Image (cartoon, rainbow, N blue to C red):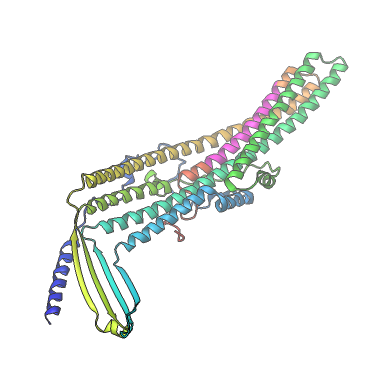
Amino acid sequence: MTRNVGLARSTGWITFLVVALAGCAVGPAPQPPAVQSVGLDEHFRLSLGSTATTPVAEWWSSFADPTLQSLIESTMAANTDLEIATQRLRQARAGLVAAQGGLLPTLGLSVGRSHTAADAPQPAIDSTSASLTVAYDVDLFGGHRRALTGAQADRRSAADNRRAVQIALAAEVAINYVSARAAVNRLQLAQANLAAQQETLQIVRWRAMAGLAGDVEVAQATQLAANTQAGLPDLQQTFDAAVNRLATLSGEPPARIAGQLGSDAHIPVAPFPEVALPVDVLRQRPDVRAAEQSVVAELARVGVREASVLPGLTLGGSYAGIGRNWSAATASPALQLSALLAGSVFRGGQDWAALESQKATAAVAAANYRGVVRSAMEELENALGSARASVAKETALAEADTAAQQAMSLARLRYQSGLIDFPSLLDVERTALSSQLSLSQARADRAIAAIRLYKAVGGGWPGAAGAPAASE
């Protein structure tokens, strides 16, 4: 009876101590920073005339290009950067499980069987032992809770970083795909113009043989055709470079990528996304969200460090028995409860240094967040500016190309009729070729501007504009 009363009193004091201190928590509140705190303008300096937000997940489907879709899918399946980001997310998930375990008690179980030989006539002694131990580290000052908060933020940050890699990869694949298509387009334009220039050169030679043209005209026609011929290898190299980059991203051999692209000279186009206000756009960017969660994680670890320098309370208990058989081992068990309050008294400033280091780490994370937000805003503004400029440029060059092609057709007829001299024809042909190549590049630039704008608004993968995907 006395033993039970003492045990009850001990348990009562332990319970009182836990209740009295369990609500304590140290360290700053790990709150995410607000985008507005960076000092953004209320509106974009440039815009496309819309304040609505359109879905941007899988934006590449708006290009209606099966080859592009296939390349992006193969890249997501084999890219090493994405594999690294996936494994980091796996690490963060494991860290979260470990942090959750820190709030739970630990259990230990041991079972033993021993045999002791004795001299005759004493019989040998066989004995069985069993014990169950329980230990619980009471989270007096919130260190374990702060660790859990930090691990949760790490998991969210890793998931957002993985999504940011997906978005960047999709954009890079699309940009190089457009570059490859544009190179084929310009190559075919140059080859068609070369054929026409060689035809003109033959006409000039015939006229020279008839005494209607001089050697200077033949030399000028030869020079124009040779210059066009000289530009073909550069265009081929541009195509090869884009193919090689696509091969690196997707893990496919360059020859297979080139076979997928073929000789299609069509430059894909897509509508521009509608863009909301700056704060709304930045909130959906995964790189901004990842930096935000990094701040939360590092602030939480400040609390972990502060709690580590304070005393810790560990509750323990054991239940053990020993006997010659299982029934005897459990028939007369020994029960023991304990409570240990312990902390360090002097560690030569190590705890203070570790705390200061963690506070500096949290300040670095906050500064990095501000830098990420400002860089994202710059990318958004530049993407909007490029989108507007690319539309205006393509429109003007399309009009100029129509006029240049009409002028070239008329100039050839007039030269054959002797109404204009050969230098005039050469100038018109040079202008026509330059106009065609410029328009081709402008169309590619417009497609690339759309890609970069989709990337800048945080689009490019399911869930990028909303909550994390279920797989995370």
Q: Position of residue 28 (x, y in %)?
A: 24, 50
Q: Nearer the viewer, residue 224 or 105?
A: 105
Residue 93: quarter of image:
bottom left
Q: Nearer the viewer, residue 135 or 358?
A: 135
Residue 318: quarter of image:
bottom left
Res 464 visible:
no
Magenta highlight: main SS: helix
Quarter of the figure that contains the N terminus? bottom left
Horizontal relation, residue 401 to residue 419: left or right: left
Residue farthest along the front direction in this orientation: 120
Horizontal relation, residue 131 to residue 453: left or right: left
Task: Please tell me which residue is depicted at 61% across the width and 34% down the height of the picture.
Answer: 441
Q: Position of residue 327 (x, y in %)?
A: 31, 85
Quarter of the figure that contains the C terminus? bottom left
Q: Point out the stretch of residues depicted in magenta.
A: 427-450
Q: Position of residue 75 (x, y in %)?
A: 57, 50
Res 158 visible:
yes
Horizontal relation, residue 390 to residue 466: left or right: right
Q: Is residue 66 above or below residue 428?
A: below
Task: Please tell me which residue is depicted at 66% across the width and 34% down the height of the picture.
Answer: 237
Q: Position of residue 392 (x, y in %)?
A: 54, 34
- Magenta stretch: includes residue 92: no
Horizontal relation, residue 370 to residue 223: left or right: left
